[in-house]
């Protein structure tokens, strides 16, 4: 499953100095201690952190994804031990990939991403996964190349090739220029193309894969599934805690929303399952999830409802509300769902390219996870209360970028970024990328504070560092 090329570091170093601390474990440590990882605590997951300490942020979400990824790997190693003799999946490597899967997210999540992409469309775009690779392989200040790769001597955290491969979700370069109305393009930046080429060569042992085969390692697939599981379960838990959703309101969802969720689920599973999901299927999934809460006697078919039916109804409504106020019940529900979903992961070993072995959720589990994801997204993320905050974030990120890209705008930035912009000279694309890196690295709070220094009527202190 792993050889020398996998463990070799980005700049060519072979890390074998301490036998008690394998290279992938060292990578895990470098990630934990990096500034970019710490900044995840200041980036919103669904609900703004200042609303409640209970809600997840990007850091706590990433920790949960890492634990789930490690659990998936441990289970696969056990269930498929006859097929993985001597070639077990490194669970700590899966956890490391999960820790950084969101590290490229800008302030205000996907809204910040769209705002930055709009500003960068003629300079190679902006995308969270591409920025993750750029942070790990360029921007973090850990190591450098002895000889610059692709004209840049920065080697970021100088992680192992297999660790970097584990975060390459999309096997394509983002075009240098795109139409102004195009959506965010998934992939990696052209500036990291040489790094990606080297990663693939080392992980595949110099062998070429068939043209129709996408490069996605087994650890990356596990991380991706773990993210889907955490997203589907814990965003729902946060929504139940916030009172945005209750089992009763979910089961009473109107047909329009059910059909929209069904359409999104169908679109997400079309490539690997190809089944059409309808609104009834969506509702049935939630009936199964909340069946214990609403278990009771059926209502009378004719005549006035019996007193017992009314009491059953009242009991069910109280039980529904309990998920908002009773953390033990929410925890139990989340735990059961995560356990079920981890148990629904299967492995198909690729004998020729073990690194590209396939990991996927079984059909029914995949559909259930996707239903939870899309329902929470469409019912909560699209609610007017959440959208108001998102709109502010989009406008704020755009406003900051506009100020920094103006003539002498670099003078508003920290000294190291200011020098990068100055050194870019007349290279407008490089200048824009440096500005983009700076803005993308902001936490939500820092972005609001930086904007306030530019726009607020209140006096801002000049003694606090930028």
Image: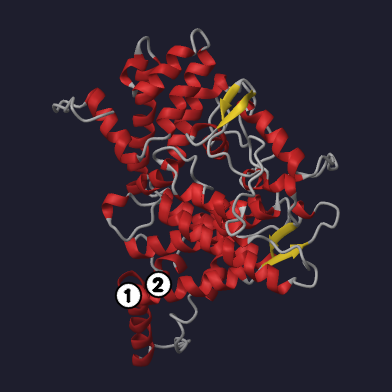
User: Which mark, by number, is residue 326?
Assistant: 1
Horizontal and vertical percent for residue 8? 68, 43
* Most distant residue in the front direction: 17
Q: Which residue corresponds to the image point at 44% horizontal and 37% vertical from the top-left?
A: 106
Q: Classify 10 Å Cα crowding around label 1: few (below 14), some (14-19), many (20 and above).
A: few
User: Looking at the rendered structure, which numbered label has been put on residue 330?
Assistant: 2
Q: Residue at x 57, y 25 (%)?
A: 153
Q: Which of the image's four quarters has the C terminus?
A: top left
Where is residue 261 drawn, in percent x and y?
A: 55, 55
Whether pointer 1 and pointer 2 mark residues with C-beta atoms closer than 8 Å, the reply is yes
In the shown orientation, is residue 81 left or right of residue 24?
A: right
In terms of depth relative to the viewer, which is nearer, 289 or 134? 134
Quadrant in which the N terminus appears: bottom right
* Image quadrant assignment for residue 438: top left
Secondary structure at badge 2 equals helix
Count of numbered labels shown in the rendering:
2
Residue 262 in sight here: no
Q: Is residue 382 left or right of residue 178?
A: left
Q: Secondary structure at mark 1?
A: loop
- Residue at 55% from the left image edge and 64% from the top image edge: 68
């Amino acid at each position: 499953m792993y050889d020398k090329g996998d463990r070799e570091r980005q700049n060519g170093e072979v890390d074998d100095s301490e036998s008690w601390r394998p290279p992938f474990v060292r990578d895990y440590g470098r990630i934990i201690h990096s500034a970019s990882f710490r900044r995840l605590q200041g980036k919103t997951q669904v609900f703004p952190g200042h609303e409640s300490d209970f809600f997840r942020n990007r850091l706590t979400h990433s920790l949960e994804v890492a634990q789930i990824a490690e659990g998936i790997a441990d289970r696969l190693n056990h269930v498929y031990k006859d097929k993985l003799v001597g070639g077990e999946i490194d669970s700590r490597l899966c956890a490391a990939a999960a820790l950084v899967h969101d590290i490229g997210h800008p302030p205000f999540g996907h809204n910040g991403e769209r705002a930055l992409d709009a500003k960068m469309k003629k300079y190679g775009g902006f995308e969270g996964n591409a920025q993750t690779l750029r942070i790990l392989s360029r921007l973090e200040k850990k190591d450098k190349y002895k000889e610059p790769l692709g004209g840049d001597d920065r080697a970021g955290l100088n992680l192992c090739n297999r660790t970097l491969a584990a975060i390459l979700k999309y096997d394509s370069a983002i075009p240098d220029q795109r139409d102004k109305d195009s959506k965010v393009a998934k992939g990696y930046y052209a500036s990291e193309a040489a790094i990606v080429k080297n990663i693939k060569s080392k992980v595949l042992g110099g062998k070429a894969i068939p043209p129709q085969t996408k490069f996605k390692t087994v650890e990356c697939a596990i991380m991706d599934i773990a993210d889907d599981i955490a997203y589907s379960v814990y965003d729902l838990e946060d929504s139940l805690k916030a009172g945005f959703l209750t089992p009763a309101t979910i089961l009473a969802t109107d047909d329009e929303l059910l059909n929209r969720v069904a359409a999104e689920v169908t679109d997400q599973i079309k490539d690997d399952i190809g089944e059409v999901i309808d609104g009834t299927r969506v509702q049935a999934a939630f009936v199964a999830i909340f069946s214990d809460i609403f278990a009771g006697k059926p209502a009378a078919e004719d005549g006035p409802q019996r007193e017992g039916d009314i009491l059953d109804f009242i009991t069910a409504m109280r039980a529904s509300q309990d998920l908002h106020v009773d953390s033990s019940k929410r925890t139990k529900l989340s735990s059961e769902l995560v356990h079920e979903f981890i148990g629904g992961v299967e492995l198909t070993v690729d004998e020729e390219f073990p690194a590209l072995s396939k990991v996927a959720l079984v059909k029914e589990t995949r559909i259930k996870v996707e239903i939870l994801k899309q329902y929470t997204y469409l019912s909560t993320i699209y609610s007017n209360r959440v959208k108001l905050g998102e709109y502010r974030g989009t406008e704020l990120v755009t406003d900051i970028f506009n100020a920094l890209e103006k003539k002498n705008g670099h003078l508003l930035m920290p000294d190291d970024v200011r020098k990068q912009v100055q050194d870019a000279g007349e290279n407008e694309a490089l200048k824009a990328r440096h500005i983009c890196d700076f803005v993308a690295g902001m936490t939500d709070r820092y972005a609001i504070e930086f904007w306030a220094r530019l726009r607020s009527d209140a006096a801002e202190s000049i003694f606090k560092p930028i």
